[in-house]
């Protein structure tokens, strides 16, 4: 539609002004629709990519949990152990154990105590002690 204006001819007053303005509005609207469709396609592509990564992470975490012979217990941990814990459903974080409690681990958040997270034993995915990492508490 923009071919009518390809030579750089301005819209001049006269008998074709209304037609030229209508053609320009149509061309602008078509361009806007094309840009919106492209943006929507990009959003869908990014969302699909994120969903695939989340599904892979959930499957990996599920595999680790499924191979356990028994759940983690307070006796499986010591102060100073390094643990990898599940965050939400797809993420993991690694911390140093600061305190072993009856139902949770207090982990070192690095802020001097004010940001030390507590995580339930069911969220622990692995424990590292003396350079040896285990994911199944029965192997401890």
Image (spheres, grey):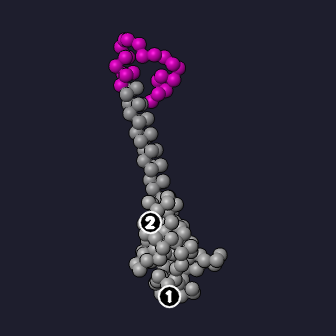
Q: Residue at x 43, y 71 (%)?
A: 119
Around disc 1, counting alpha carbons within 10 Å, would you say few (fewer than 14), some (14 to 19), or many (20 or more)? few
Where 131 falls versus 46 (above or below)? below
What is the secondary structure assignment of the residue under circle 1? loop
Is residue 41 placed above or below 99 in the rendered structure? above
Please give the label number shown on residue 117.
Answer: 2
Farthest residue in the front direction?
A: 112
Q: In which quarter of the image is residue 123?
A: bottom left
Q: Which class describes the residues within 10 Å of circle 2: few (<14), some (14-19), or many (20+)?
A: some
Near-viewer residue (52 or 69) = 69
- Judged left or right of residue 137, residue 23 is left
Q: Marks 2 and 1, Cα distance to the nearest angstrom?
A: 26 Å
Dot 2: what SS?
loop
Looking at the rendering, the stretch of residues picked out in magenta corresponds to 1-22
27 or 46, nearer to the observer: 46
Residue picked out by circle 1: 69
Q: Where is residue 68 drawn, in percent x and y?
A: 50, 84
Residue 21 lies in the magenta stretch? yes
Q: Residue 98 carries which label?
A: none
Which quadrant is home to the C terminus? bottom right
Disc 2 or disc 1, which is closer to the eye?
2
Residue 3, image x and y in percent? 49, 26
Q: Where is residue 4 in the image (x, y as percent from the top left)?
A: 47, 24
- In the image: residue 123, left or right of residue 129: left
Q: Do we see residue 89 in this rendering? A: no
Q: Please identify the quarter of the rendering in which residue 88 is found.
A: bottom left
Tell whether position 49 is magenta.
no
In which quadrant of the rendered image does the N terminus lie? top left
């Amino acid at each position: 539609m923009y071919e009518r204006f390809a030579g750089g001819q301005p819209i001049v007053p006269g008998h074709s002004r209304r037609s030229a303005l209508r053609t320009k509005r149509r061309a602008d609207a078509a361009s806007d629709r094309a840009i919106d469709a492209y943006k929507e396609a990009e959003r869908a592509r990014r969302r699909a990519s994120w969903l695939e990564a989340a599904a892979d992470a959930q499957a990996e975490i599920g595999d680790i949990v499924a191979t356990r012979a028994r759940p983690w217990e307070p006796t499986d941990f010591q102060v100073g152990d390094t643990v990898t814990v599940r965050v939400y459903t797809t993420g993991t974080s690694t911390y140093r154990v600061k305190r072993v409690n009856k139902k949770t681990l207090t982990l070192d958040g690095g802020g001097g105590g004010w940001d030390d997270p507590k995580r339930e034993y069911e969220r622990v995915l692995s424990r590292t002690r003396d350079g040896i990492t285990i994911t199944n508490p029965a192997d401890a």
